[in-house]
Amino acid sequence: MDSIVIIVLAVILLALIILNNIKLLPPPQPVPVVGGCAGTQYGCCPDGITSKMNIYGTNCPGYIPRPKPIRGCAGTIYGCCPNSTIPKLNPYGTNCPGYPPPPPPPPPQPVIGGCSGTQYGCCPNGTTIKTSPQGTNCPNYPQPIGGCAGTIYGCCPNSTIPKYNSQGSNCQTM
């Protein structure tokens, strides 16, 4: 029995020596691509031939740079106050130092036949003609708080007039 144990241990020892001396192959390394768009750092231009020299492809044929944002007075809605870099807050520049106030609006034209001679009558001021049954063009017409987003159904197309329902049935008369 001792000889069997010795033979088993010798076989195990021999197997361990053999396994210890076997060299396993290293994992395969990716082969670098030479040439073509995949072989460049940033790929190719849209023409598929020219390689990009940066991520934006500024050297590519037909490259169009992005427009730069307009700064200063030209980048404001109403420009700047005269002889200043202060942006105007409205077309008249009422916030500009020493700038004259806007001219008063022209007086309303008298309605022939009075308010009863119009399709929708007059606004509460008695002189402005309503352009809709709701009088949305009337001075001091209540505007929704938060704009169109502050209404349940939004506003009529191309308008700040709130819709009365999801179909906007009040918008059709405008």
Image (cartoon, rainbow, N blue to C red):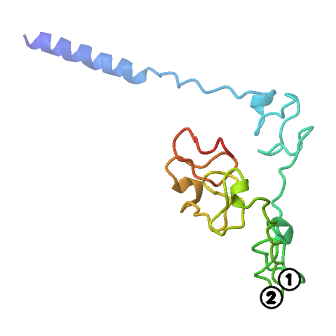
Residue linked to disc 1: 84
Residue linked to disc 2: 97
Residue 145: which quarter of the image?
Answer: bottom right
Foreground: 64 or 83? 83
Q: Residue furthest right?
A: 61
Q: Where is residue 160 in the image (x, y as percent from the top left)?
A: 64, 55
Residue 48: which quarter of the image?
Answer: top right
In the rendered view, does 77 fall on the left or right side of 164? right
Q: In this view, does 154 lie above or below 109?
A: above
Q: In this view, does 123 lie above or below 131?
A: below
In the rendered view, does 91 fall on the left or right side of 141? right
Q: What residue type is labelled 1?
A: Ser
Foreground: 23 or 58? 58
Foreground: 137 or 51? 137
Q: Which residue is drawn at 89% across and 39% down?
A: 60
In the rendered view, does 49 fall on the left or right side of 147? right
Of tags 2 and 1, the one toward the viewer is 2
